Amino acid sequence: MKTLQELIRPNIWSLAPYSCARNEFTGEASVFLDANENPYNQPFNRYPDPLQVQLKEKIAALKGVRPTQIMLGVGSDEPIDLIFRIFCEPAQDNVVAINPTYGMYGVCADINNVAYKQVNLNDDFSLDAQNVLDACDANTKVIFLCSPNNPTGNSLERSEIEKIVTGFEGIVVIDEAYIDFSNEPSWLASLNAYPNIIVLQTFSKAWGMAALRCGMAFASEDIIAFFNKVKYPYNLNLLTQEAVLKQVEAVEQKNKWVETLLAERSKMIANLQNLPLVKHIYPTDANFVLAKVDDANKTYTYLVNKGIIVRNRNSVTLCQGCLRITIGTPQENQELLTALAQMV
Ligand SMILES: *Cc1c(COP(=O)(O)O)cnc(C)c1O
């Protein structure tokens, strides 16, 4: 790995962080006259904890990492954007990502004026590490991997990811938004072994809190320190911090949801496979299935007219003819299957 100083943009490396009032004082006090807040309208009058100490302690215990290895963002979309702003000099550096994958990496690259180089997965959506490494040059700062991958659903092979993590001099992002639905081990266990990885997870999927906007980035303490310098000081509002904390304390509920969704996923796959219009179901480790159908556009429009919305991936590389179907409640899944069975 290159040194962090070589990887981080010079202006960010030398940045003096904004020191907010709530950051400067830590300890016990009862009179807060330091932040120009209104003393009335509790609890919304006070700025929230900028470093989310309580919540991170709970997440750290759950995930087996140190609180200082965690950055919490407004969804994982915030750390994705911060990765560009911290590591990538606009109009000079580039990033490499697998294709197809989550669209947000490319959007953030465009917004930050950073070249986005895509490397196609194999036809079965497996990863060829050498192809990814071959696409990198001296200005490649970050490689984006997503496992289980969206929209394909499969996990990338661990040994191939490892070749990239060990063979690349820069930062490797491993987006694990769907890890709760997979039997594959998380890369979190390797966080201490590989100082160049950033693992992303989210409360938006298995945890059922997409509306609250809370994502997690896990990395070395040195990298997390830069996330904390660059993020908005009060990025996570009070209601989000409180609600996520409560849910993290109720991890068994999340595990039950996952169990239910995995059982529904098996049923969905079996039932879809019985439909003549379904040509192929790709293996999935996520809470969705990618299905190749006779005519994706026609099927998509037919379902829309029945009030059922799936994701049409027909125009995505390697996904021609494919619909991405999220696993819903048993009733919702049955509605979809019934509608598809009635399609002529
Ligand atoms: C849904 C998803 C996310 C989650 O984004 P949030 O901003 O946390 O809601 C991240 N990565 C991938 C690959 C996803 O599919």
Image (cartoon, rainbow, N blue to C red):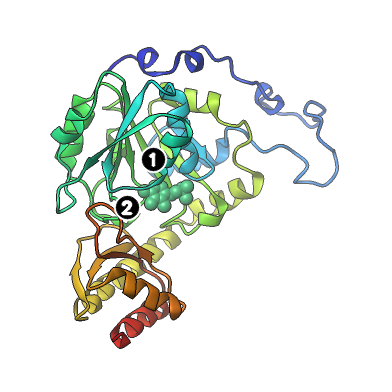
The image quadrant that residue 328 belongs to is: bottom left
Figure check: 182 above or below 64: below
Which x, y percent locates residue 31?
A: 82, 30
Residue 87 or residue 68, whichever sits in front: 87
Question: Image quadrant of residue 316?
Answer: bottom left
Q: Amino acid at mark 1?
A: Gly
CB contact under 8 Å: marks 1 and 2: no
Look at mark 1 in the image and give the residue it sits on.
106
- Residue 169 position within the rendered picture, expressed as x and y whole percent measured from the top left: 25, 21
- Which x, y percent locates residue 129? 16, 36
User: On the rendered image, what quadrant is the N terminus found in?
Assistant: top left
- Kindly indicate the quadrant of the structure image that contains residue 325: bottom left
Q: Residue drawn 37% across and 16% down?
A: 4
Q: Is mark 2 within 8 Å of ligand 1?
A: yes
Element type where label 1 sits in the image:
helix
Q: Residues within 10 Å of mark 2 (few under 14, many from 20)?
A: many
Task: Name the N-terminal-most of marks 1 and 2.
Answer: 1
Q: Of the residues shown, which amino acid type is indicated by label 2?
A: Asn
Q: Which residue is mark 2?
A: 150
Residue at image location 43% in from the left, 21% down from the top? 89
Coordinates of residue 249 in the picture (x, y in percent):
50, 52
Is 42 left or right of 17, judged from the image as shown? right
Q: Residues within 10 Å of mark 1 (few under 14, many from 20)?
A: many
